Amino acid sequence: KVTPGAREAHVGTGYGDRTLYALRPYDGAVLWTFQAPANNGFEGAPAAVANHVYVATLGLAPEVYALEQATGAVTWHTALPSTGSRASIAVAAGRVFVNIDAHELYSLNALTGAVQWSAHTSSGTSSQGSSPAVAFNKVYVGSDDGLYAFDVATGTLAWKHPIAAITGFSSPVIVASGTAVPLVLISAADMKV
């Protein structure tokens, strides 16, 4: 369900009421809303790129949505397995990256929503709140047993750095300027970076 409004939008999410809100940044006026189907909600942050807002749901029938930034109208939606995603969306290279609770990273075509590839991370059982980060032709994501780096185009595992403590709730951060060497940072449940 979409309630349209003015064109200028800034987006926020809400889980309990299943509603994605587009708010005007100057005064907080609601420009449009989008409501997820019953038994689903939004937990991760959306991404706004190229006149679209991308967001994933968590729940009994989870999906990834591409919405028109100006109106909230649905451009496409793609079903997700398991219970969906509690992580934020990443968008790069014409792809939408979604880390789901079933310990899988998905790459979707940003224009059509078609699944391009999926890749497994750990075989753990904890929820996965690690939001993907994209740089250097790789997509990085934390899981129960470490930090994973996948090739953006193919989903092939480029490398994995094992970490004994759970990193599935931490999101990687890329530092590419101001340092002599680019860095990928992630924290773990043992309170180390």
Image (tube, rainbow, N blue to C red):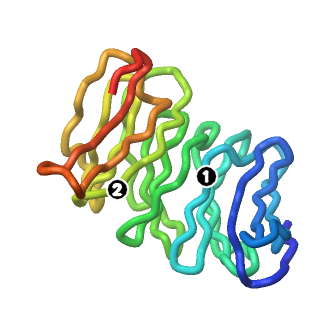
Locate residue 5 relative to residue 143 in the image: left or right: right
Q: Residues within 10 Å of mark 1 (few under 14, many from 20)?
A: many
Q: Position of residue 25 (x, y in %)?
A: 72, 69
The structure residue drawn at horizontal position 31% and vertical position 49%, both measured from the top left corner, is 174
Residue 86 appears at what percent x and percent y? 60, 40
Look at the numbered discs 1 and 2 and tell me whether their residues touch, using CB distance below 8 Å: no
Q: Disc 1 to disc 2, how far (Cα)?
A: 16 Å
Ranked by sequence position, the earlier of labels 1 and 2 is: 1
Residue 185 visible in image: yes
Q: Residue at x 52, y 72 (%)?
A: 49
Quadrant, the C terminus: top left
Q: Amino acid at mark 2?
A: Val
Q: Which residue is mark 2?
A: 134
Image position of 185 (left or right of 15): left
Which residue is rendered at x = 40% and y = 61% of the image? 116
What's under tag 1, amino acid-wise? Ala
**Label 1 secondary element:** loop
Answer whether residue 79 is visible to the viewer in this image. Answer: no
Q: Nearer the viewer, residue 187 or 136?
A: 187
Question: Badge 2 local density, few (<14 within 10 Å), some, or many (20+)?
Answer: many
Residue 134 versus residue 10 in the image, above or below: above
Residue on which disc 1 sits: 45
Q: Secondary structure at mark 2?
A: strand
